[in-house]
Image: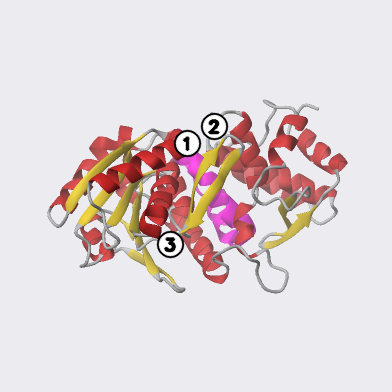
Amino acid sequence: MSDTVLSVAGAAPYDVVVGHGLSARLPHLLGESVERVAVLYAGPLGALADPIVDTLVEHYDVLALGLPEGERAKTAPVAADCWEALGEAGFTRSDAVVTIGGGATTDLGGFVAATWLRGVRVVHVPTTLLAMVDAAVGGKTGINTGAGKNLVGAFHEPAGVLCDLALLESLPHDELVAGLGEVVKCGFIADPQILDLVERTDPAALTAGSAELRELVERAIRVKVDVVVGDLRETGGADGHPGREVLNYGHTLAHAIERTSDYTVRHGEAVAIGCVFVAELAARAGSLDPAVVERHRTALSRLGLPTTYDAASFDELHAAMRVDKKARGSQLRFVVLDDLAAPRILAGPGEADLRAAYAAIGGPA
């Protein structure tokens, strides 16, 4: 099957390529002016990164920088170490960064590229399903602080994204399933055909080489591309649509779960729980039919994703949600649905409804 090229329009247009064996496309995406390339990769992925580094070495001076695994990479000290390495290697504004890894690597590497000399080119090579459909596309970069997730960051669009599905062959099954949380989210907020495909496909058939997984990946990326093109910097959409904020469906609770669990809950798993929570919240606000709430549970649980949570009290999670970057002053904001693909913002829901929604997903008082 030939590669699929999804074009992201805007002031700095770029392509997202989906296919198998895509590393040969890297030099074209990086451009002719680049002399040095810093490859930022998740440390445990050394063997997976080697063939990509070998391709780059044929064309550039390559600086390979291994990063801590997962969210431990997304800290100011790690970013500072990368800046020092770029400085020592003499990286200029015409040089570039390539990231190889999951969402944390993409976020950290994109932030380093955004801030080195106020911005150098970056190409993302995501190695997880989650990163392919979420972190690598859209130009959001960031690091975590003790106060919360992604509170420090910058908008910095990549020069390209290579979603090489062959890289998913070595991905642990639990990580593949977790990535599907973001895919199903896209089905609820914009493309119900994703839900139809999930509901009629044997979950065991969703493998790296399957046509079904490829279609889910491409559909989820198209959802994100369409949203990002319309609202790059999350300033709001037209006709009451939440704009880019819609991509945060389920994320307010998800980020609180991640933070209070010290990131032991995978992002996609937390998003799945968060989606059920906001569906319950919308039902209590009188805007969402109970059948659609139940569809959240059945679609997500069919894939093996969690739909309940009881490892933290409501008060702990509520405090974490209050420092979420989507909050406005003391007011919490949630993306909710009035129906499938009909999202809106629910600002300042009452604490009673929040507690009831949490109780509905198994949460303790």
The residue tagged 3 is 157
CA separation in Å, label 3 and label 2: 26 Å
Q: Are marks 1 and 2 in contact (CB under 8 Å)?
A: yes
Residue 241 position by quadrant: bottom right
Front in this rendered view, residue 284 or 304:
284
CA separation in Å, label 3 and label 1: 21 Å
1 or 2: tag closer to the N-terminus: 1
Using residue 298 as the reference point, say whether residue 172 is left or right of it: left
CA separation in Å, label 1 and label 2: 7 Å
Q: Is residue 47 magenta?
A: no
Using residue 234 as the reference point, say whether residue 56 is left or right of it: left
The residue tagged 2 is 263
Using residue 169 as the reference point, say whether residue 256 is left or right of it: right
What element does badge 2 sit on?
loop
- Residue 289 lies, in percent from the top left, at 79, 54
Q: Which residues are magenta?
A: 174-203
- Residue 46 lies, in percent from the top left, at 26, 36
